[in-house]
């Protein structure tokens, strides 16, 4: 076993260095250098993933589907999703995404799951647009014969390619229909 004893010169020089450094009256605060900007990492053969931005057009990075608004069909006013008593309009926005053939059709589907199942379909004839905004009108009725009956529902919108393959589905939105007053 080897025991090392610090040399007196090293101990004295360290002590003198500390005393000289602390001799002035300035506050001694550590200030780290600014962090370098984060660079996106990419594996070999792939491009770095883009950072999300509020100004990026829908469908830029792939197929997307969104429900952008739910309004009262008669007034166009926003509604409370837990107390729906009148027909509603569901505003949707879908994008096929890059790389889809321009000569391909498709369809936009609005689907309601709950007290009863219901769907509405917008057929997109070829050549289908890359981005589609559409407003679906959902009827509501107390008797359930002329519209959706009272109950809890989840609603989502999706886009399908011309071959029927699902391209994208929105986040489900929960609503409660109370029926007509």
Image: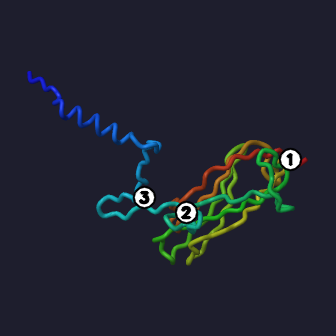
The residue tagged 3 is: 37
Local secondary structure at mark 1: loop
The one of 31 and 173 positioned closer to us in this rendering: 31
The answer for how far apart the CA atoms under marks 3 and 1 are is 58 Å
The local crowd at label 1, few if under 14, some if 14 to 19, many if 20 or more residues have their Cα within 10 Å, is some
Task: Please indicate whether residue 144 sits to the left or right of residue 17 in the image.
Answer: right
Rendered image: mark on residue 9: none
The answer for how far apart the CA atoms under marks 3 and 2 are is 17 Å
The local crowd at label 3, few if under 14, some if 14 to 19, many if 20 or more residues have their Cα within 10 Å, is few
Q: In which quarter of the view is residue 178 placed? A: top right
The local crowd at label 2, few if under 14, some if 14 to 19, many if 20 or more residues have their Cα within 10 Å, is few
Which residue reaches farthest right? 181
Vertical side of 151 occupied by 60: above or below? below
Does label 3 or label 1 sit earlier along the sequence?
Answer: 3
Rendered image: mark on residue 53: 2
Does label 3 or label 2 sit earlier along the sequence?
Answer: 3
Tell me residue 176's x, y (percent).
Answer: 76, 44
Tell me residue 2's x, y (percent).
Answer: 9, 24
Rendered image: mark on residue 142: 1
Which residue reaches farthest left? 1
Q: Quadrant of the N terminus?
A: top left
Q: How is the image coloured?
A: rainbow
Q: Nearer the viewer, mark 2 or mark 1?
A: 2
> Residue at image x 18%, y 30%?
8
Does label 2 or label 1 sit earlier along the sequence?
Answer: 2
Local secondary structure at mark 3: loop
Task: Please indicate whether residue 171 sits to the left or right of residue 25 in the image.
Answer: right
Are the residues at dot 3 and dot 2 in contact (C-beta closer than 8 Å)?
no
Q: Nearer the viewer, mark 3 or mark 2?
A: 3
Tell me residue 86's x, y (percent).
Answer: 85, 53
The answer for how far apart the CA atoms under marks 2 and 1 are is 43 Å
> Residue at image x 57%, y 66%?
58
């Amino acid at each position: 076993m080897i025991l090392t004893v610090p040399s007196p010169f090293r101990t004295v020089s360290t002590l003198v260095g500390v005393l000289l450094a602390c001799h002035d009256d300035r506050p001694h605060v550590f200030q780290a250098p600014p962090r370098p900007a984060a660079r996106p990492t990419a594996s070999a053969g792939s491009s770095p993933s883009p950072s999300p931005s509020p100004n990026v057009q829908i469908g830029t990075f792939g197929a997307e589907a969104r429900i952008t608004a739910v309004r009262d069909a008669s007034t166009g006013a926003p509604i409370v999703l837990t107390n729906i008593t009148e027909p509603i309009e569901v505003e949707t926005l879908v994008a096929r995404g890059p790389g889809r053939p321009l000569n391909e059709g498709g369809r936009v589907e609005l689907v309601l799951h709950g007290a009863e199942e219901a769907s509405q379909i917008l057929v997109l004839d070829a050549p289908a647009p890359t981005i589609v905004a559409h407003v679906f009108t959902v009827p509501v009725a107390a008797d359930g014969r002329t519209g959706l009956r009272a109950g809890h529902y989840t609603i989502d919108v999706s886009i399908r390619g011309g071959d029927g393959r699902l391209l994208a589905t929105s986040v489900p939105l929960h609503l409660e229909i109370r029926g007509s007053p």
